[in-house]
Image (spheres, coloured by chain):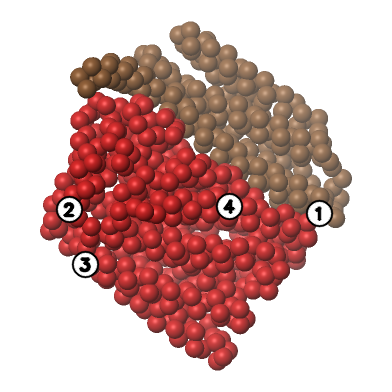
Amino acid sequence: MIMRGELITPEADLVDRTVYNALFTMHGSVMLFFWTFPVLVGLGNYLVPLMIGARDMAFPRLNAVSFWMIPIAGILMMSSFLIPGGPSQSGWWAYPPVSLQNPTNNLINGQVLWILSVAISGVSSIMGAVNFVTTIFKMRAPGMTWFRTPAFVWSVLAAQLIQLYGLPSLTGGAIMLLLDLTAGTSFFTPERGGNPIVYQHFFWFYSHPAVYVMVLPVFGIFSEVLPVHARKPLFGYRVIAASSVIITVISSAVWVHHMFASATPPWMRMFFMVTTMLVGVPSGIKVFGWVATIWGGKMRFTTPMLFALGGISNWVFAGITGIFLGSVPIDLHVHNTYFVVGHFHYVLYGAIVMGIYAGIYHWFPKMTGRMYYEGLGKLHFVLTYVGTALIFLPMHPLGLMGMPRRVASYDPEFAFWNVVASIGGFLLGLSTLPFILNMVSAWVRGEKVGNNPWRAYGLEWLTSSPPSVENYEELPLVVSGPYGYGRSEPLVSNVPNPDLTEFSESLTSQEVS
Amino acid sequence: MTVERAISQDTEAAVRQHQEHDEAGNSKFGFIVFLLSESVIFLSFFVGYTIFKTTTTDWYPEGVTGLETREPLINTIVLISSSFVIYVAERYLHDKKLWGFRIFLLATMAMGGYFLFGQAVEWSGLPFKFQDGLFGGMFYLLTGFHGLHVLTGILLQGLMLGRSLIPNNYDNGYFGVEATSLFWHFVDVIWIVLYTLIYVWQ
């Protein structure tokens, strides 16, 4: 999983002019479908059974199948660079009629490969989602009631429910697009009576909630990392857990805010403007919960903590520009400008990728039994944070000045901010070097630490590091809720767990780094 | 701690027994979740059909005024009754009467086969092709996609029939048969919506 993150390192393609269209299509598709999704699903796959005290996921074989479909789909998509005509050039949203153009007239063209590859990864995601939902519903350890389930598990459940109701809609749209492209139907072909707007609905009905599929597990990571490193229970745990599910529900009704400029009737714009604002409420609840969690805590500024705090700060920023974009008058003005690009990169890189890094550093000792190098980790954080600000902040003034997105060349008046953004891009590329170095060398010869180096309170820290094949030697019987910092209650009753519970000692003698 | 521990071990033994017994329960739960998700694909096609139908001016291709409803209605009745037949088959299996199970499962397969045959006859007699406008595309997409599911259902039933020939195969639960039966009911329900949308609402 970490290897996957390293293989497809987010590189800024800002300065590249040649085959720019193909590049931004592939950048968007590869980053979303083959970087962010698999990494988060991988983390979830690893952590959910540990956190709920299960031996494995509910359907291990199904899990393996869905895992191996991802590299197949990835190879299929990348192979489109090798065929005549090159890869798809219609962006990751693949709107018709642009996506229906076929200049080479080959049956196998970049667009067809793109659709097939997305379809395969979609099937794989649905299998994964069935697996997650069944696991979380049916396989929690005895005594682990819903409100004893960690917030990360809640958020993974909420995200996978979105996959279940949203992804089939994209699959349906993709089937129709494929038929239009290859079999001569005319669902979305305007010159033959089709309606391309319907595709936009199909696409965004999934693809807006898809953002929540990615960001919800990251919220979960924040909710797990903060209490451990601030030595306090998660503030408003029940509300934070429930707000994940509320996001699932509301996010099913916000998709048209991507289409305010697509001949959408005014009543629809109004409705979706309101729902878009509404979805900010549960997200805001979470942010307040996190701030209250670290308030007055005994903060340890370790690398995962830094990444979590940095990610939350970026999320607040992205959330505010999101509210900007959600209101119709502003959206119509900045639609298709770099303002939008800046917004969603702040979400995806600023919040989601930083959250992923926080999760990887936080659970690295659990996965390997060894500790990463703190100095390299902090260097990684500084480079990432500064790089993120440098590359994505200038996109906002650029957008307000009117620079359109998806163009390879631009008016000279935009040059200054673009140079700044490019520097930021290279900085981000550079920032992954200490990360890779850190992970590889720490895995090989990092300092061996025990089962629970963070003195964290959670089921996953009970078992050995790295966990044995079946996770637990004895099925834990859970007797109290998560995040019991300062409560001195045992978490499980049938296995001795002094590591988890003797916080009166650990709270005073811990070193604050 | 010791008393607590003794109590908890009792509970744990009970729970573990419960969980091992519930393996099939997990599979069934997962399968229902999958079917719900699958139904959303059909839902998106239905929604697309409704939008296209209500916004297009020349809905039917030239020379087409509507669809024949009598033959499809017979087809529909056959398909829906097959849902009851497979239920009877499942009851026979529940009572460990394998021959009853096999006969009724075979009957379900025959009814499904009749449905597919009827649809093939209907397709071959239609005056429009799937390239003919939105209606042609939607009609063949919906019926074809549903037909694929019917075919899958029949193949699954054949598999279950074959597995019933292995001695004692269904003695310790028969999740495969339950899933096949659930899938068949699902295909039926989808067809009812589809029939209403395409044939009744003309």
The number of callouts visible is: 4
Question: Is disc 3 in the same subunit as disc 2?
Answer: yes
Image mark for residue B34: none
What whole-number distance in Å separates the C-alpha atoms at marks 2 and 1?
A: 62 Å
User: What is the display colour for chain B?
Assistant: brown
Classify 10 Å Cα crowding around label 3: few (below 14), some (14-19), many (20 and above).
Answer: few
Return the disc, 2 or 4, that comes first in the chain's sequence. 4
User: Label 4 belongs to which residue?
Assistant: A281
Q: Secondary structure at mark 2?
A: loop
Depth-wise, is mark 2 or mark 1 nearer the camera? 2
Where residue A214 appears, as percent x and y from the top left, is 47, 54
User: Label 1 belongs to which residue?
Assistant: B55
Depth-wise, is mark 3 or mark 2 nearer the camera? 3
Residue type, numbered disc 4: Val
Query: Closer to the camera, B122 or A315?
Result: A315
Check if mark 4's residue and mark 1's residue have beta carbons within 8 Å. Answer: no
Where residue A103 appears, as percent x and y from the top left, is 59, 73
Image mark for residue A370: 2
User: Label 3 belongs to which residue?
Assistant: A375
Q: Quadrant of the N terminus of chain B?
A: top left
Depth-wise, is mark 1 or mark 3 nearer the camera? 3
Question: Is disc 1 in the same subunit as disc 3?
Answer: no
Residue A155 appears in which quarter of the rendering?
top left
Residue type, numbered disc 2: Arg
Classify 10 Å Cα crowding around label 4: few (below 14), some (14-19), many (20 and above).
Answer: some
Residue type, numbered disc 1: Thr
User: What is the display colour for chain A?
Assistant: red
Give above or below for A61 relative to A455.
above
Residue type, numbered disc 3: Gly
What whole-number distance in Å separates the C-alpha atoms at marks 4 and 1?
A: 35 Å
